[in-house]
Amino acid sequence: MENGAIDMQSLPGGFNLRLTLESGQSYGWRRVDGEMFDGLDGATYETVADGLGIRISQEGDDLHWRATDDATETIERLLRLDDDLEHIYSTLPDDPLLDRAIGRYRGMRLVREPVFRCLISFICSAQMRVERIYRMQRSLAEAYGDEIALGDVTIHAFPSADQLAEATEAELRELGLGYRAPYVLDTARMVASGDAPQAAGNLEYESAREYLTRYIGVGEKVSDCVLLFSLDFLEAVPLDTWIRTAIESNYPGCDRDTYAETSRAIRQQFGGTYAGYAQTYVFHALRTGDISNPEART
DNA sequence: CGCCAGGCTAGCG
DNA sequence: CGCTAGCATGGC
């Protein structure tokens, strides 16, 4: 077991652990000192990544961690501490909605999620409330994942594709996955048989989005989530219900006939390269109701 | 009770 | 191709 702290004082744009892990991007961290969204500061979270059991919490400019081995590089990668947030903010457009979201959520970073659990998480996300998605992924981890001992606590890893491929559809329905159960199972079996989603990483963005729809339960929107939250396509803008609402009210010129065309328009509206950052700030603001949309029709 | 949630698939025309 | 009915489950 090792302990450490990462000093984030000099990190451009800062860092906010709670916003980063409770904004519906990653469903792979479990909050251990309370339920998700209960608003407590100094929250503590656990996950397993790179085979390491990790527990982290934030106190001011320090990100404290305890892990089964040195987890510094893993944490920096998972939480995108390599992103220059100030530069990214500077590429996003000035508009009332985005300005207020950035002002309120300064330090919220995108995540760089392990791709298989990201894929499964967002297959499960279809027609599902964010709060329930967290519980579903935790159920999958407890039912099929490895148990990692960290001191006197046990952390459940998200199952590998091989592990999840051994489940049955009936079991997954028992966990409350509903009609997504066969999607999850078929996708896990595809990945387990060697069809790796990482292959999308070598493609140009729109080709990559098309590529991931090969998996059962993955359409354009879920594909965009995987590209954005796992595969470093920061220009990806998942067109979910909240973003579509924002497009209608705030960026009506971006509303087109097809997903692909609306995607191009909103990506350009959000400054191109880091458009996915804008998407995530707007998504969190509208979903939580933290910010009343200045352009919304009442 | 009805409605809706980070949509997708299959099966039409 | 584009379009849409149907889909599980739980919380309000």
Image: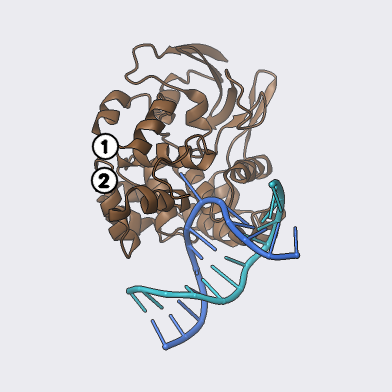
Chain colours: A brown, B blue, C cyan
Side (left or right) of A139 relative to A119: right
Q: Which mark is residue A269?
A: 2
Tell me the chain of label 1. A
Question: Who is closer to the viewer here, A185 or A133?
Answer: A133
Query: Could you tell me if residue A183 is visible in this image?
Result: yes
Question: Who is closer to the viewer here, A37 or A195?
Answer: A37
Side (left or right) of A76 relative to A274: right
Tell me the chain of label 2. A
Quadrant that contains the N terminus of chain A: top right
C2 is higher (above) or lower (below) than A173: below
Give, as a three-letter code, the residue at label 1: Pro
Cα distance between the residues tagged 2 and 1: 7 Å
Circles 2 and 1: CB distance less than 8 Å? yes
Q: Which mark is residue A93?
A: 1
Q: Position of residue A246 (x, y in %)?
A: 40, 48
Q: Position of residue A228 (x, y in %)?
A: 37, 43
Element on which disc 2 rests = helix
Give, as a three-letter code, the residue at label 2: Gln
